[in-house]
Image: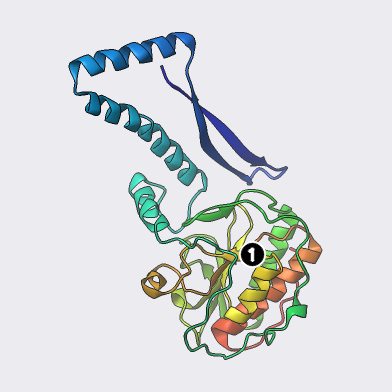
Amino acid sequence: MTTYVVAEQQENQSDSTICLSQTSILHVTLSGPALILTILAIIISVQIFNPSLTCTLVALSPIPAIIHNDYKNFVSLGPGGTPSTFFGYLKIVYLRIFALTNPYMPLDISYKVHPAEGYYQGAQCWLPRRTGPRPTVAGIAPQRQLDQPGSSKIYHSLRVSLENLADQQPELLRIGTSCFEKNGLALFSQDPINTTCRGEICHIHHSDRSMHMNLHPDDARVVLEKGWGQRHPLARGGWMIAYVPREFVMIYAPRDRTALDVVCRIIEAAAFWVTGKSFEIKPMSD
């Protein structure tokens, strides 16, 4: 019998809502009896079948376990823009072919951008550098942060801040369910100047407390360089804008009040890109 040894990486925080895990096949181990039976099975197969067919079957034998493990990883990321079904998984496997190889490389602007400059005029000083290593990120749709989720208090403060902003600007903004994710709180523009999914500016993931948002390429470049986020794997433009805009960026979950202030400034930039107007977002407590 073949035993597949897996390593499990799981984030269990004090808040029970955070529980994302990923498993990866490392290697195959065989016990003594299993090894003998496997050798005998191969010898018998060579005698019964064509040797080349036997070699092919042996080489392909790990594939079902690899697919099963990969499918479990996909489902473990929770609900998102793709249904958590096997057909949804097959769609993601296909999209992986076209995913960005380096999500930290800024977007190469080879098209006309309006507004011509970012909200912060491309200034490098508007964001401090994020402390510590980047979190571990997995998936495409959904794309999730596996560690460093921050506290529930910070998460709820971020939600309340977005809700209050929409309440203060009802003619310009509204709160709703994310158009990209099909679940989760999102901030929308009532009259967007840049095309997104129904004018969506940003949305928050309840499972890991990270965000996705649309940013002017100038502002996104600073966000990437200062370590606050990374591009979505499908944000490469062309025919893939059917899934997400090329300016689509993941922002890591704020871990403390200082990080929350920074994330609010990034959301201000996202609101400017989608609406063309300036907003001040003050972190609120729920």
Asked if 208 appears above or below 276 in the picture, the reply is above
Image quadrant assignment for residue 263: bottom right
| Amino acid marked by disc 1 | Gly
| Residue beneath the point at 70% across and 43% down | 13
Residue sitting at the far right: 258
In this figure, which residue is indicated by the disc labeled 1?
229
From the viewer's side, name the closer residue of 153 and 254.
254
Q: In the picture, which quadrant includes the N terminus?
A: top left
For the C terminus, give its image quadrant: bottom right
Q: Position of residue 280 (x, y in %)?
A: 72, 81
Q: Is residue 213 left or right of residue 2?
A: right
Q: Residue at 52% of width from left, 56% of height from top? A: 143
Which residue lies at the image location 29% right of the left edge and 14% below the top edge? 43
Query: Mark 1, residues whose alpha carbon is within 10 Å: few (<14), some, or many (≥20)?
Result: many
Q: Of 281 and 258, which appears nearest the observer? A: 258
Classify residue 129 as left or right of residue 72. right
Would residue 216 be seen by someone viewing this image from the given angle? no
Identify the secondary structure beneath mark 1: strand
